[in-house]
Amino acid sequence: MASRSNSSMRIFLLFCFFTQCIYNAIVRAQQVPCYFIFGDSLADPGNNNNLITQAKANYQPYGVDFSAGPTGRFTNNRTLPDVIGQLLGFPEFIPPFANTAGKNITKGVNYASAVSGIRDETGKNQGDRVSLNKQLLNHLTTYFKIRQILGSGTATSQHFGKCIYVIITGNNDYINNYFMPNMYLTSRLYTPQQYADVLAAQYTAQLKVLYSLGARKVAVFGVGLIGSAPQMITRFGANSTNVSLTAQLFSNKLPGIVNNLNSLLPGAKFTFINVTGITITSPPAPGLNTTGTCCQLVQNLGTCVPGSTPCPNRSLYAFFDGFHPSDVVNAAFGQRAYTKQLATDASPYSIQQLSQLP
């Protein structure tokens, strides 16, 4: 199993030109009026910058290839939601909730916060963070502001019903919760299957809250092979494969949750993005380093040493730091999520198909 995991992590993927995701070469019309993003550090564009936390990326070498430099994104350039936003035709990146103001919020807001999770306590080992529950409360604030801008509840409901929603969460409920027994009780209270059930129940309730706030087109990302991240291999060694297998117990429940929500909620168009499936079906990119990191790491944190010099060719590394993919991986993965190259990539819809639904 470890061999399979390692080979699959050669991963994520062919270079951008192999997956036809060089965005600047493509002229796209904006496909939906608005785009809202929830999640963890894989999606955080800078919401943690002013929090008292170790989970920050607003310093070099993060953003070394990003036009605005270090913004709080945990990668060298774009995050996965950034790439998806470009594929959806948005001319600008969706701003963090911490920096939003005025009528621009009608185009979308990014609420994601590093080390956050489905459970409120997740990530407390690193300090402040915005849990998914708090992100939903922030979206409620946005909802009322947009209702004030649009002038009626009907117009607001119609507007939100056309938006794309992306949620990338659950990773830290394992990385910064269940697999930290000295900090959290969860691994003593629950077996792996029980914990997956508890997470699934809470996440289902949270997705229903999002629906109640007008969301209809929602892409729910599964948890990937988190045990294959360089920092997790350092932390757990050969047992890192068990981390991935345990997290998959939760991720495997998400397709059923999505199908149930689509059946129970009028007009709901939820879809599951199969992170693990995309990973293990991606052919290895020639020369791509899938075990090392592009930057020097802070010991025990897995983030880049502030001010350190990153590797000169970021396109040859799958991981920029100990946990987070490089831009080349985010670009290739975003293309698979957007277009559904294989039937197993997304169910029932690709993000592109989701954008085209009425």
Image (spheres, rainbow, N blue to C red):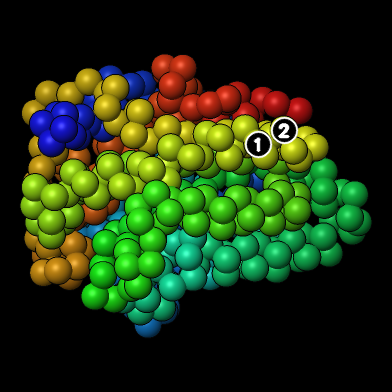
Q: Which residue shows up at 18% across the image and 44% down it? A: 241
Looking at this view, name the residue that lies furthest to the bottom.
Answer: 52
Marks 1 & 2, CB-CB < 8 Å contact? yes
- Disc 2 element: helix
Relative to 229, 109 lies left or right: right
Rendered location of residue 85, percent (x, y)? 51, 40
Please say if 180 is above or below 338: below
Relative placement, left or right, of 130 versus 309 is: right
Percent coordinates x, y for residue 262 in the rendering: 69, 34
Measuring 26% from the left and 44% from the top, which residue is drawn there? 244
Name the residue: 36% across, 21% down. Answer: 20
Task: Tell me which residue sits at (82%, 52%) in the image.
Answer: 156
Which residue is denoted by mark 1 in the rendering? 260
Q: What residue type is labelled 1?
A: Asn
Q: Label 1, label 2: how many angstroms apart (C-alpha)?
A: 5 Å
Q: Can you see residue 266?
A: yes
- In this rendering, does residue 70 appear at all? no
Q: Is residue 137 above or below residue 152?
A: below
Quarter of the image containing the C terminus? top right
| Label 1 SS | helix
Report which residue position mark 2 lands on: 263
Horizontal side, residue 100 vs residue 345: left or right: right
Label 2: how many Cα within 10 Å (few below 14, some 14–19, many 20+): few
Q: In which quarter of the image is the N terminus?
A: top left
Q: Where is residue 36 in the image (x, y as percent from the top left)?
A: 59, 50
